[in-house]
Image: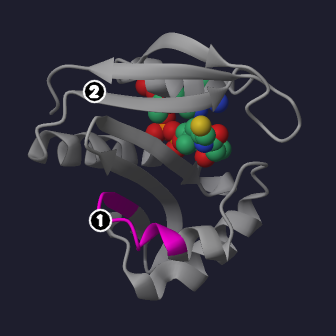
Amino acid sequence: MKLRRWKYTDVAALAAFEKEQEFPDSWNYNMLAESFLNDGFYGVLAEEKGELIGMAAVMFGPDGADLVNILVKKDRRRRGVGDALMRAVLEECGRRELKKLFLEVRESNAPAVALYEKYGFTRVGERKKYYADGENAAVMCREGKNP
Ligand SMILES: CC(C)(COP(=O)(O)OP(=O)(O)OC[C@H]1O[C@@H](n2cnc3c(N)ncnc32)[C@H](O)[C@@H]1OP(=O)(O)O)[C@@H](O)C(=O)NCCC(=O)NCCS
């Protein structure tokens, strides 16, 4: 597995990948393309033999950062790709000397919550009806030293 930063020329492939995974909160082409307009944007993707198998993204801002996207190909889950993407994200946080990384996650999304807890995120709040279908989001935060 190889990890590398997103390039603008990856946008079409990333959008097609998101669509294929049938994840309810996936990003579309425009959202992916617009992310490149933000200076604080960092996207990392995982490839195996040239095939896209996972992606993650962080929006760095003046007051902290948000993990805005992490998604692994359906038939490649539970094989360490999420771990590898999360480590890449935390290494980037370390390079930027970031101390607090936030995220929102569906309260029902047990695999994602387990992944975040494994990397030291704790629940710090809730956003009511955050998702289009009315589900609440748990707000989680990871503080302190990055790898
Ligand atoms: C969440 C997601 C990214 C995890 O990716 P993955 O490649 O399967 O994760 P890994 O195999 O690297 O597992 C890393 C850790 O995540 C947790 N985890 C992943 N899948 C899990 C599952 N089905 N049940 C419980 N824990 C799980 C475990 O803590 C695991 O560590 P362990 O192997 O030491 O137990 C993947 O399930 C996914 O793409 N889900 C759909 C998109 C999504 O929900 N994104 C989050 C939006 S907020």
Label 1 crowd (10 A; few <14 / some 14-19 / many >=20): few
Q: Which residue is drawn at 41% across and 73% down?
A: 36
- CA gap between label 2 and label 1 equals 18 Å
Under tag 1, what secondary structure? loop
Q: Left or right: 65 with respect to 26?
A: left
Ligand 1 found in image quarter: top right
Number of residue marks: 2
| 35 drawn magenta | yes
Residue range (magenta): 34-44
Q: In this figure, which residue is indicated by the disc labeled 1? A: 39
User: Is residue 141 positioned above or below 70 on the image?
Assistant: above
Please name the amino acid that badge 1 sits on: Asp
Q: Position of residue 21 (x, y in %)?
A: 72, 59
Percent coordinates x, y for residue 47 in the rendering = 42, 69
Q: Report whether 4 appears left or right of 91.
A: right
In-image side of 74 versus 62 (left or right): right
Taking depth in this image into account, of 75 and 27 the one nearest to the observer is: 27
Farthest front residue in view: 62
Q: In the drawing, what numbered circle is on residue 100?
A: 2
Q: What residue type is labelled 2?
A: Lys
Give the residue at x 79% y 26%. Answer: 129
Does residue 142 appear in this view?
A: yes
> Looking at the rendered structure, which numbered label has been put on residue 62?
none
Asked if disc 1 is less than 8 Å from ligand 1, the answer is no
In this rendering, would 42 be left or right of 110?
left
